[in-house]
Image (cartoon, rainbow, N blue to C red):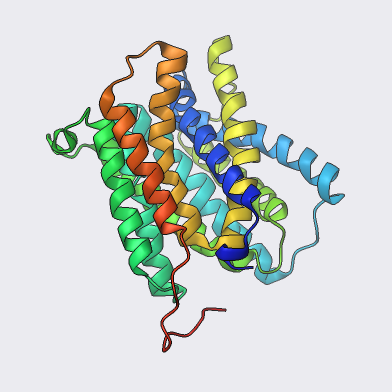
Amino acid sequence: MTSASAPPSIYGKLVVVAMLWGGTFVAGRVAAHEMPAPTAALWRYVVACVALLLLSWRLDGGLPRLTRAQWIGVSLLGLTGVATYNLCFMFGLERVPASRGSLIMALNPAMTALGAAFFLHEPLTRNRVLGIVVALFGVTVVLGHGNPLALFTGDMGVGEAALLGCVLAWVTYTLLGKSILMGLSPLAATTYAALTGVIFLAIVAAFSGNLIIPQASTQGWFAIGFLGVFGTAVAFVWFYEGVKTIGPARTAVFINLVPVAAVTLGVLLLGEALEMSMLVGGVLVILGVYVINRPSAPAPAAPVPA
């Protein structure tokens, strides 16, 4: 199915995914300050695995048997998109403010589009390039309070480097998912990735001395629950539906909405001031998402990717 014929519900789900992932920055900050990064990442996915297994039983009647090649594939998904991504995410949020962290994460769509063009031979159309630039500029306006250059002052720290590791892990996860989904449903692929990812996270937690039940507050456990059920089980399944339907590059651009969602949730839940720069930047991000998903007239000599 091409993006031009994709049902509107796909785009609606991807917007909700962005809102949920915006909430993960709030929940991640809470969890990262109450427990070590390996512990927080592990328990997020323990919760997620329970939710995903229940969804698999309810919606698909269980998980399908995997071939050897599929086991290798979902193990790579678990290593990149679950273990590596979440360790970097929790480690980064211990040290980097949510606004700066979400800006770094906004590099995902650009890097995914480049990766899809290089590895999957997806065309980098003018609309995609323009949409990515506009959306990224909108994110910098939102998070820079009207001055995008303010976000790039200061030295690169360990936390920023960890979040850049998130970007690389996510791009790999997204591009791998395109091929893995050829033989698996989004729910099955996500569930198997979570299960294999938990094994990797448990190994890291054990070797670092953090394979423990955290002594967290009610707020801390609520944050873990939100991260596991909504930020993982629901959001990842819907995200993979987008990857399968409209492709990784166009799906990934919705991540540009995540920082805007994080700011919005900060206003609604934490009573932060709503600045004009947030409104202007939000419009630019939405415009960028629209432009990159607007069908382009195909070039006559360009092959259509399978």
Answer above or below: position of 170 versus 149. Answer: below
Closest to the observer, 101 or 206: 101
What's the residue at 22%, 27% (across, down)? 145
Q: Could you tell me residue 136's position as x and y percent?
A: 30, 47
Q: Quadrant of residue 264?
A: top left
Asked if residue 74 lies left or right of residue 79, the reply is: right
Give the residue drawn at x 47%, y 21%: 35
Answer yes or no: is residue 50 visible: yes
Task: List x then y, in percent, for residue 63.
Answer: 80, 53
Vertical order, 119 against 96 (above or below): below
Q: 14 or 228: nearer the eye?
A: 14
Residue extending farthest right: 61
> Residue, x 73% and y 35% (percent of image)?
50
Indicate the position of residue 104 as horizontal and vertical percent values. Answer: 30, 42
Q: Is residue 194 above or below residue 48?
A: below
Residue 131: percent from left, percent from top: 35, 55
> Taking 161 as reference, is 84 left or right?
right
Q: Tag count in the figure?
A: 0
Q: Residue furthest toward the front?
A: 297
Snapshot quadrant of residue 140 = top left
Residue beneath the point at 57% across and 79% down: 306
The answer to whether residue 220 is left or right of residue 158 is right
Q: Quadrant of the N terminus?
A: bottom right
Q: Nearer the viewer, residue 208 or 113?
A: 113
Quarter of the image for residue 13 reads top right
